[in-house]
Amino acid sequence: MENLLTSAEVILDCLSDGVYVCDRERRIVYWSKSAERITGWQPGDVLGRLCLEDVLCHEDKDGHRLCGEEHCPLHRSMVTGATTTVPVTVFARGKDGRKIPMQVTTAPIRNESGEVVGGVETFRDVAPMLQDLERAKMIQAQTLEQDLPADPRLHFATFYLPHDIVGGDYYAVKQLDSDRYGFLLADMEGHGLAAALYTMQLGSVWNQHFQLLTNPARFAAEVNKELVRIFASVVTFATAVCGVIDARAGKVRLTGAGGPPPLIIRRNQTMQKIECPGPLFGVMEDVPYEEQIVELEPGDSLLLFSDGAFEIRNAKDGLLGVDGLIKILTNLDYPQKQLKMDHLQEELLKFSNDIRLQDDLTIIEVRFWGQ
Amino acid sequence: MKIVEKRENDICILTPIGRLDVNTSESFRERLLQVIADGTKNIILDCQSLDYISSGGLRVVLEGAKKTWQLEGKMVLCSLKDYIKEVFEVTQFDSFLPIAETVEDALKEF
């Protein structure tokens, strides 16, 4: 047994996960046999080179390059001194040029006095699992991507960025009659595959009942009833905000089910939270839903968002919150400038000092131009 | 997560300390369900030392509450800090289970 444990490298080489070690400057000092098997890169190709050089080319699921400072998982671990608690899915480039999806965990390496002297990254090839997830993503996208209504009095836009390949947010917008449009933004508790499956069920509920949105509180009561039935003995819930906008009357009626307060952005750029509390969807039947009515002036906008846009923590344990989101939107010159998801995501990541958002992020934007 | 447990007759008073989030929800869930499995059907969740609750944390609270209902008992929440109070207000948690100001008030719910 003692002989078996004499060399850590021998043990590391036996693992099926790839392992590599970098020093403080991120120079690769160890590259395991499995790392070679998964990527095709041999120790001679990578040892002594910086991991951020043009070797591994890590990208996130949305195609953003991660190698560098802020977004590199290994660099993050060395700077924050924290080990990843949840593996991150990244895409690396193999020696033959193909993109390899892998789940990565990173940890800092400390010397005896506790100083960070390097970092270790382990990675697992998740190509087979990912093929399935990519199909699931496509199926989910077909449910979410509906044509947005076209009306010269209004402009609708939606933004959707799942935390994983598939997500637990659901959104929909639909014309109800010549003047009114119904909308729903819901967030299934949790994220990933299980939450994504529930969004598919919610999609069916939406298709069946969206016409009820002429009365949002009634629609909410019906969705709640359906979700109680769907969840059955599983304890989970959805938070949501739904409503109807009347383009002729310039009025929005909103009903909440534990979802974040929508923002009304007035023409003079003041942003106002519309609190619309309401019982979570899917917990208990026959709970009451109420509605809030907001008058819109031409030039006003309405923003609905999932909690992924503001329930963001940074390493100092600070919470962004809705007020923090309002500050970010103001700094992005919204609403004078169009809302760009890339810019918003960048600002949110700057706050969290993280390489990816902590939850699914969905936004529905309605701009009201009037007659 | 540290959880202080006290008894008042057949009522178990659980005081979770810190944050109920993705890292702590599972250990809190195990403890809560264990208390119920050991035969307690009346629970007060004293939130005086709870700084944060995620939606996963809310799910665990609901799961515990539902288990107590199945046993014809109940769960009462009390002593919510401002942030937690806000979360429970937005989600109208009081439509599902009673929320009291203090442990003493919570005890009166049984």
Image (cartoon, rainbow, N blue to C red):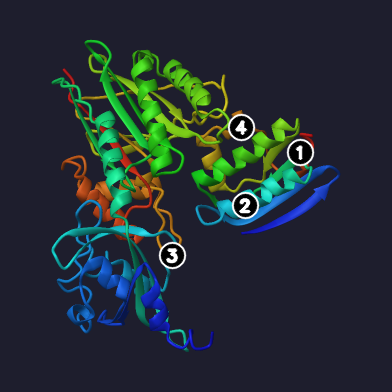
Query: Element at badge 1?
Result: loop
Distance CA(mark 3)–CA(mark 2): 23 Å
Q: To which chain does the residue with label 3 belong?
A: A
- Between disc 1 and disc 4, whose residue precedes? 1
Q: Quick check: do tags 2 and 4 share a chain?
A: yes
Q: Is residue A17 left or right of residue A345?
A: right
**Residue on which disc 4 sits:** B94
**Residue on which disc 2 sits:** B28
Crowdedness of circle 1 by 10 Å Cα count: few (<14), some, many (20+)?
many
Q: Are marks 2 and 4 in contact (CB under 8 Å)?
A: no
Q: Given the image, on which type of amino acid does mark 4 rest?
A: Asp
Residue shown at 41%/56% (left/top)? A313
Q: Given the image, on which type of amino acid does mark 3 rest?
A: Lys
Q: To which chain does the residue with label 2 belong?
A: B
Distance CA(mark 1)–CA(mark 3): 38 Å
Distance CA(mark 1)–CA(mark 4): 19 Å
Q: Quick check: do tags 1 and 4 share a chain?
A: yes
- Between disc 1 and disc 2, whose residue precedes? 2
